[in-house]
């Protein structure tokens, strides 16, 4: 075959974008598998998002990720939405399908894949701390995969109630909002506890969730969305009593694997991305 000097383009639009390690993971996978694709991390302000999407269209990009603050506002510039993105009203991955830009959401799908290595969501009673983008994505995918009973614990009541009503009306599952009170006790009936807040992130300044750690039971599965550090105080305390834990690295690697599959139709090796993420974040 003759040499081509033209690569397929993919990337990410966000601001601030400098701390986003996805580019390192994805480029490592492209290189390892000799895929003729490139991933470019782009700093895009909200006022420039429409033009950034037009630019991607003009250059026939294979697709792109969206991160803060564009996951909702990008929808108006797209040609259609996948099922879970439609339900969530948020897109983190756009795929060029025969010239049409279709919005998908891979955050929750990445979590679900990591979760299914440990157990099935079916029939589980799930408590989610937080009700922001990550919580919505996780709750919707778990419900689409058979989870039927949710407790959403959040400080801001409106955000919590919005997620509860989304789960009830669009996914017909049982869901309850609980206002976050000090030293929150996780009810004994909970099978799966998920931290989907930003508490625990290295640069968030707050590492300890305001929960009663003694209320975590050995029989619970405890998951955290925080990528850095992967062993949050929540996960440390859960594993110290023998509970099964799931860290945020699996979620972030899986969502990148799913995105690359959408763009290239190729199944990349997750361990390549995992190792590169650990290398660049010095984990
Ligand atoms: P959002 O801003 O949409 O939501 C943040 C949530 O955290 C809200 O529910 C907020 O509560 C809650 N929260 C923030 N601070 C506190 C606190 N001190 N105590 C209790 N609750 C708090 O953010 P995202 O949902 O997009 O992201 C949340 C986290 O998930 C981030 O750390 C992000 O990096 C991570 N993430 C990880 C992914 C992965 O692949 N591993 C993918 C996507 C996100 P309130 O509504 O009351 O303000």
Image (cartoon, rainbow, N blue to C red):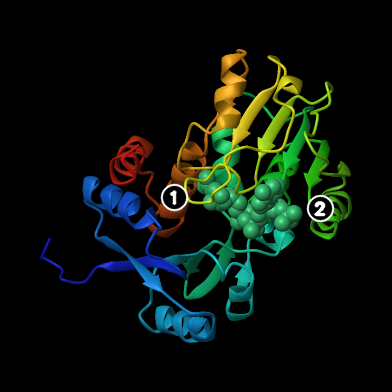
The C terminus lies in quadrant: top left
Q: Secondary structure at mark 1?
A: helix
Respond yes or no on whether mark 1 lies under 8 Å from ligand 1: no
Asked if residue 195 is positioned above or below residue 46 in the image, the reply reads above
Which badge, 2 or 1, comes first in the chain's sequence? 2
2 or 1: mark nearer the eye? 2
The N terminus lies in quadrant: bottom left
In the rendered view, does 39 fall on the left or right side of 139?
left
- The image shows a total of numbered marks equal to 2
Q: Is residue 41 something one can see in this rendering? A: yes
In the rendered view, does 144 fall on the left or right side of 58?
right
- Residue at 11% in and 65% down: 3
- Of residues 164 and 30, the one nearer the viewer is 164
Q: Position of residue 260 (x, y in %)?
A: 41, 53
Q: Pointer 2: what residue?
A: 160
Q: Is residue 116 something one can see in this rendering? A: no
Residue 256's label in the rendered image is 1
């Amino acid at each position: 075959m003759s040499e081509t000097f033209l690569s397929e383009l993919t990337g990410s639009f966000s601001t601030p974008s400098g701390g986003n390690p996805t580019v390192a993971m994805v480029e490592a996978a492209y290189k390892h598998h000799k895929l003729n694709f490139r991933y470019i991390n782009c700093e895009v302000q909200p006022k420039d998002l429409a033009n950034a999407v037009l630019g991607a269209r003009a250059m026939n990009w294979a697709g792109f990720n969206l991160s803060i603050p564009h996951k909702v506002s990008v929808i108006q510039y797209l040609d259609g939405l996948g099922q879970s993105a439609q339900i969530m009203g948020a897109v983190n991955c756009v795929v060029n399908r025969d010239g049409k830009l279709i919005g998908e959401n891979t955050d929750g799908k990445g979590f679900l894949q990591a979760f299914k290595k440990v157990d099935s969501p079916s029939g589980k009673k799930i408590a989610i701390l937080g009700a922001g983008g990550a919580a919505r994505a996780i709750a919707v995918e778990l419900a689409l995969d058979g989870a039927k009973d949710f407790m959403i614990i959040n400080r801001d009541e409106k955000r919590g109630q919005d997620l509860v009503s989304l789960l009830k009306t669009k996914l017909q599952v049982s869901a309850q909002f609980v206002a976050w009170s000090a030293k929150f006790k996780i009810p004994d009936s909970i099978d799966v506890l998920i931290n989907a807040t930003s508490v625990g992130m290295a640069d968030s300044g707050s590492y300890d969730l305001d929960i009663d750690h003694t209320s975590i039971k050995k029989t619970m599965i405890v998951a955290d969305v925080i990528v850095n550090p992967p062993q949050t105080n929540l996960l440390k305390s859960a594993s110290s009593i023998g509970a099964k834990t799931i860290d945020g690295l699996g979620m972030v690697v899986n969502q990148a694997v799913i995105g690359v599959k959408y763009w290239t139709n190729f199944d990349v090796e997750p361990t390549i991305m995992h190792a590169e993420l650990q290398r660049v974040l010095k984990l």
